[in-house]
Image (spheres, rainbow, N blue to C red):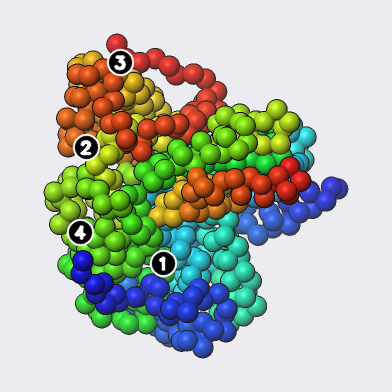
C-alpha cells in the first residue's frame, strides 16, 4: 500500500460515505505529483477509494484547481474579474508579462513560469488579487511586480 | 465629508484587537455561552428564537433561516441521520465577506455551527469552503483542532472541513451537495428539497457562513432584541463587501438599510481619483446593475427589489465614469460561461452566445440587430434552467442594456469602443474550462 493511498483512506474515514473524499483525495494526489494529475495519479486515487480511474478523471476535469497537464515550476495567476479589472488588473498583468517575458496563457521557455488570468479569487476589496501556486496575495500594484518576480526567482526558479 | 457614525458590530464584535483565533481568549470574552443557552432550551425553541429574529439567509436568496430549519422533519418522523452543511464556497464576484468572517471570528462561526446542529438535531456539520481560500481554510482548521480537544463543546457532533476545488456552481446548494457526495457539482432538480432529502438523501440544512455566524449573537441577545436592529424585512447588520473604484475597499458591517451613498462615500471614502460614479452592482455580480442616480437606495431586501435589483450576497461593486458597460457585461458573461456546469442547455449554450455577441459588439463588429439578439438570448436562458446561474447572466446583460443602452449604441454607431480609458478593457480570463468540462466546441452564433 502506498503512502498516498494510506493518507487518502485516512481522509475518507471522516466521511459517512467514501466517495465524498474524491476531492481531498485528488488534492493529495496533485500535491504528490508536483502540482498536476498524471494518469498514474488517477490509478492511485481509484485504488484507494475503490472507484474507477475514469470516474476520478470525470471529477478532476470538472474543477478548475485540478491540473490535467504538467505544471510550470511556478504558476502566477492574475484575477481579471470586474473588481480587480476596475482598479488596474490589466496593468498588473502587463507588468508580469514584462518581468517574466511570458504572455498570458503561456509558459516561459525554460518551463519556470506560467502566467495566467483567472476568474474572481474572492478578495475584490483588496484588488488586485493574484495567486502564486494557489497562494493568494492581495493589493498587488504594478510597481510591486518586479520585487515579487525577483523573490520568486530567488526561490530557486 | 461626514464622519462615520457609530457602527454596531454584531458579527465582528470583540475583534478590535484583531482576529480571535485562540479558543481560551474567545471563551474568556463570553464565547460559547450562546451554545450553552441553546442547549438548555428544546431544539424547537432554538428554531423559534431564530424565527423571531427574522434572520434572512445571507448567501443570496434571503430565505428566512428559522423557516428553513422548521422544514426539516424531526428524527422521529424521518429516522435518518440529519446534517448541517455550511456553504463557505463564497465565489460570487464582488463578495468576500465570508472569508473575513472565518478569518476574524472563527469560533463565533463554529459556535453557530454547533447551535445549528443542536436545533436541527444533526450528527454532522460539513463546512464546504472554497478551494481558493487558503488562509481562511488554515485559520478554520486550526480553530477546529482547538474545539475538537473539548468534547463538552462538540457535544457529540462531528465537524468536517471540506475544501472545494474551484467551481462557482458549488455555491448553489444542491450542486454543493452533489460535490460533497463526490460527484461533479451539478444542480439537482427540486423537489425534493434538501430539508427532506439533501446530503446522502437525508434531511439537510444548508446555510451560508454569515447566516450561521449570526445565529450565535441571536441566541446571545434573544431573537426579539436582535430584530430591533435594522429595518423591517432586513433585520440586524450585514457585512457589506465594497470593491471597485472606491478609495477604501473592504468589508463593512453596517445596519441593514444603510444607503449605498453612505457605504460608498462615508465608509468607502468616495470614488477614487475624484471621478464620478457611473454604475453600482449592489449585491454581487449576479444582481442587476444600478445607475448613479440610484445611489440613495437603502441596502435592504425590499428597497433593492423595488429598485429592480437584489441584495444578493451584499457585495457592492462601484464603477466610475471611465467604465464601458459593454465591457462590464462581457466580463460578467465570460465569467458565467466559464462557470456554467453544462447540465442545462439554455445556460451552457446561452452564456457562450451572450459572450460572443458582446465580444463582437465590443470589437466594433456589432450590428443594430445584435442588441435585439442579446435580449432574445437572455429571454431564452432566463427561467429555463435548474438553477439561477444562467438567469444571472441574462439579468446582468439585460440590465446593462436597459440602463446603459447609449453605451451599446455608441459601439454600433462608431464601429469601435468609445471608452478609451475604460479599465475594464484588456485580457479576459480564458474560457478553456468550457471545452474542458464539455469536451467539445460550441461556436455557433445564432443567425
Say which element carries label 1.
helix
What is the chain letter for disc 3?
A: B
Which residue lies under the disc numbered 1? B212
Front disc: 3 or 1: 3
Residue at the top extreme, as displayed: B447
**Mark 4–mark 3 contact, CB under 8 Å?**
no
What crowding class fits label 3: few (fewer than 14 Cα within 10 Å), some (14-19), or many (20 or more)? some
Marker disc for residue B399? 2
Tell me the quadrant of the picture where the N terminus of chain B can be found.
bottom left
Q: In this image, B30 relative to B422: left or right?
A: right
Q: Earlier in the sequence, mark 4 or mark 2?
A: 4
What crowding class fits label 1: few (fewer than 14 Cα within 10 Å), some (14-19), or many (20 or more)? many
Q: Earlier in the sequence, mark 3 or mark 2?
A: 3
Which residue lies under the disc numbered 3? B365
Front disc: 4 or 2: 4
Residue B426: x and y in percent read: 42, 32
Q: Earlier in the sequence, mark 4 or mark 1?
A: 1
Amino acid at each position: 500500500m502506498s503512502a498516498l493511498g494510506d493518507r487518502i483512506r485516512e481522509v475518507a474515514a471522516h466521511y459517512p460515505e467514501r466517495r465524498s473524499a474524491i476531492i481531498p483525495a485528488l488534492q493529495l494526489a496533485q500535491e504528490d505529483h508536483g502540482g498536476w494529475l498524471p494518469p498514474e495519479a488517477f490509478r492511485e486515487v481509484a485504488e484507494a477509494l475503490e472507484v474507477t480511474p475514469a470516474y476520478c478523471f470525470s471529477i478532476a476535469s470538472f474543477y478548475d484547481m485540478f491540473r490535467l497537464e504538467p505544471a510550470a515550476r511556478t504558476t502566477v495567476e492574475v484575477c481579471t474579474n470586474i473588481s480587480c479589472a476596475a482598479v488596474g488588473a490589466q496593468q498588473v498583468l502587463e507588468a508580469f508579462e514584462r518581468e517574466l517575458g511570458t504572455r498570458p496563457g503561456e509558459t516561459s521557455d525554460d518551463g519556470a513560469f506560467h502566467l495566467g488570468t483567472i476568474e474572481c479569487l474572492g478578495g475584490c476589496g483588496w484588488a488586485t488579487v493574484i495567486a502564486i501556486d494557489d497562494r493568494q496575495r492581495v493589493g498587488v500594484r504594478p510597481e510591486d511586480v518586479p520585487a515579487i518576480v525577483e523573490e520568486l526567482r530567488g526561490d530557486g526558479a | 465629508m461626514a464622519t462615520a457614525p457609530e457602527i454596531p458590530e454584531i458579527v465582528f464584535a470583540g475583534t478590535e484587537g484583531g482576529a480571535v483565533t485562540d479558543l481560551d481568549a474567545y471563551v474568556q470574552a463570553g464565547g460559547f455561552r450562546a451554545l450553552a443557552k441553546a442547549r438548555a432550551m428544546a431544539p424547537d425553541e432554538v428554531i423559534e428564537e431564530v424565527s423571531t429574529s427574522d434572520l434572512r439567509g445571507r448567501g443570496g436568496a434571503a430565505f428566512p433561516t428559522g423557516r428553513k430549519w422548521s422544514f426539516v422533519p424531526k428524527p422521529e418522523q424521518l429516522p435518518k441521520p440529519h446534517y448541517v452543511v455550511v456553504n463557505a464556497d463564497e465565489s460570487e464576484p464582488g463578495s468576500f465577506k465570508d472569508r473575513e468572517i472565518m478569518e476574524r471570528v472563527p469560533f463565533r462561526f463554529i459556535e453557530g455551527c454547533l447551535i445549528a446542529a443542536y436545533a436541527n438535531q444533526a450528527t454532522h456539520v460539513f463546512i464546504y469552503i472554497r478551494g481558493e481560500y487558503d488562509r481562511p481554510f488554515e485559520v478554520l482548521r486550526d480553530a477546529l483542532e482547538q474545539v475538537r480537544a473539548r468534547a463538552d463543546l462538540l457535544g457529540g457532533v462531528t465537524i468536517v472541513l471540506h475544501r472545494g476545488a474551484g467551481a462557482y456552481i458549488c455555491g448553489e446548494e444542491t450542486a454543493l451537495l452533489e460535490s460533497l457526495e463526490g460527484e461533479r457539482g451539478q444542480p439537482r432538480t427540486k423537489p425534493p428539497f434538501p430539508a427532506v432529502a439533501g446530503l446522502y438523501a437525508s434531511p439537510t440544512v444548508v446555510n451560508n457562513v454569515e447566516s450561521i455566524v449570526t445565529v450565535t449573537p441571536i441566541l446571545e441577545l434573544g431573537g426579539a432584541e436582535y430584530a430591533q436592529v435594522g429595518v423591517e424585512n432586513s433585520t440586524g447588520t450585514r457585512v457589506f463587501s465594497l470593491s471597485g473604484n472606491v478609495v477604501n475597499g473592504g468589508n463593512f458591517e453596517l445596519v441593514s438599510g444603510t444607503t449605498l451613498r453612505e457605504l460608498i462615500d462615508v465608509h468607502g471614502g468616495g470614488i477614487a481619483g475624484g471621478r464620478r460614479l457611473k454604475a453600482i452592482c449592489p449585491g454581487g455580480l449576479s444582481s442587476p446593475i444600478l445607475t448613479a442616480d440610484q445611489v440613495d437606495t437603502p441596502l435592504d431586501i425590499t428597497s433593492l427589489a423595488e429598485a429592480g435589483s437584489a441584495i444578493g450576497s451584499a457585495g457592492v461593486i462601484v464603477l466610475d465614469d471611465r467604465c464601458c458597460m459593454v465591457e462590464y457585461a462581457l466580463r460578467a458573461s465570460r465569467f458565467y460561461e466559464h462557470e456554467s456546469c453544462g447540465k442545462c442547455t439554455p445556460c451552457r449554450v446561452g452564456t457562450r452566445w451572450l459572450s460572443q455577441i458582446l465580444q463582437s459588439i465590443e470589437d466594433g463588429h456589432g450590428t443594430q440587430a445584435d442588441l435585439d439578439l442579446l435580449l432574445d438570448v437572455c429571454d431564452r436562458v432566463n427561467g429555463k434552467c435548474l438553477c439561477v446561474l444562467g438567469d444571472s447572466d441574462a439579468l446582468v446583460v439585460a440590465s446593462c442594456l436597459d440602463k446603459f443602452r447609449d453605451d451599446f449604441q455608441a459601439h454600433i454607431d462608431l464601429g469601435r469602443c468609445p471608452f478609451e480609458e475604460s479599465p475594464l478593457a484588456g485580457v479576459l480570463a480564458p474560457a478553456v474550462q468550457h471545452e474542458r468540462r464539455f469536451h467539445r466546441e460550441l461556436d455557433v452564433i445564432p443567425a
